[in-house]
Amino acid sequence: MIAENRICIITGAAWRKRRRQLLEGGGDIRKLVRADGMARLGRMTEEELDHLLQAHENHKHKRECLKYDDKRCLSRVKLPGGRKIIVKEYRRTRTWLRFSPDALGWLGSWRLHGTAQCLGWYRNSSEKTGFLFFADVGEHDLTFRRRQCVVEKVSNAFYQAGLICGNLHRLHVFHNDLKPSNFVVDEDGKVTLIDCDDVRILWRLPERLMLRNVAQVLGGIYHLAPCKLNMVAWKAFLQGYFLQMPGMRQTIDKKLNKIMQIALLLYPARNEINATFFQELVNERSDRSQ
Ligand SMILES: Nc1ncnc2c1ncn2[C@@H]1O[C@H](COP(=O)(O)OP(=O)(O)O)[C@@H](O)[C@H]1O
Ligand SMILES: [Mg+2]
């Protein structure tokens, strides 16, 4: 199954105009200056903003968060109409608004169409925290934590992750955080990319950045249960990736050792399992090329 998860980018004058609207308000973006802070709202109302902030606080209080650490806090909130929203709180923001991770996430997710839709941004002036509000794109990310997995699910999900990664590279986009936890899968099996806080659109994407992205995904795959699924995931990812980037097939075959070195530096705790799978992949791909 191939789900429709194509990514497009806005460039040139169209992006300059959109960027201005996203920062200053205009078009379908509303900028609000309130006593408690400032908001930029796209596909949500001010009432929804207040509801989401309040519900997020309640989730934090009850420790019902998707993630809670010193930098970020995320929760899933249901709006009165039934729409599910992910509230992402940035607990460390920078005063220079445009270069703060929350502002970069706001711009990045609008620039890459086909990633999780960002509905609004809010900055609380007294607590200096920033918030982004995203459409919920699925229950699980590709770490498949605490889940017994089946082959079809894993291979379909990583195949789509490979398509998305290849799609980004074809557009010369570098997503600096392209790991399995930043791909989310919904109940129909459709995979969506999230977390666009650090995306760069280049004139030409250098090979080393492509290899880095591949290493980030392959090396970051958790121990899946049963364990042989890790190899299924690796192969499915590369299959999807090569469909979008056929020219990279030979490079990746030649540079598997380089990819492994990058992965070992990125994820030292997963050294042992990654080394085993890399070796299996090296053997298999060299058999095939003989
Ligand atoms: N739009 C979304 N839909 C569904 N789940 C999400 C969404 N955004 C985040 N999540 C879940 O929350 C986790 C952390 O979100 P993420 O934006 O990646 O935060 P961080 O920047 O801290 O990595 C993700 O790995 C995913 O499981
Ligand atoms: Mg993430």
Image (cartoon, rainbow, N blue to C red):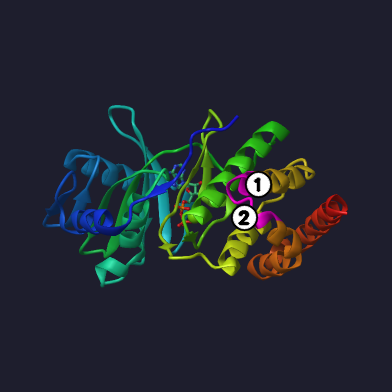
Crowdedness of circle 2 by 10 Å Cα count: few (<14), some, many (20+)? many
Residue 115 left/right relative to 270: left
Q: Is residue 153 above or below residue 183?
A: above
Q: Is residue 196 above or below residue 188?
A: below
What type of secondary structure mainly makes up the magenta span? helix
Is label 1 in a helix, a strand or a loop?
A: helix
Number of the label disc, if any, that sits on residue 237: 1
Q: Residue at x 75, y 59 (%)?
A: 253
Frontmost residue, 41 versus 21: 21
In the picture of the structure, the residue carrying the numbered disc 2 is: 217
Quarter of the image for residue 49 reads: top left
Amino acid on which the number 1 mark rests in the picture: Phe
Mark 2 near mark 1, Cβ–Cβ under 8 Å?
yes
Q: Is residue 74 above or below residue 274?
A: above
Q: Position of residue 73 (x, y in %)?
A: 41, 54
Give the label, 2 or 1, closer to the camera: 1
Q: Residue at x 33, y 27 (%)?
A: 82
Q: CA distance from mark 2 to mark 1?
A: 9 Å
Q: Position of residue 10 (x, y in %)?
A: 33, 52
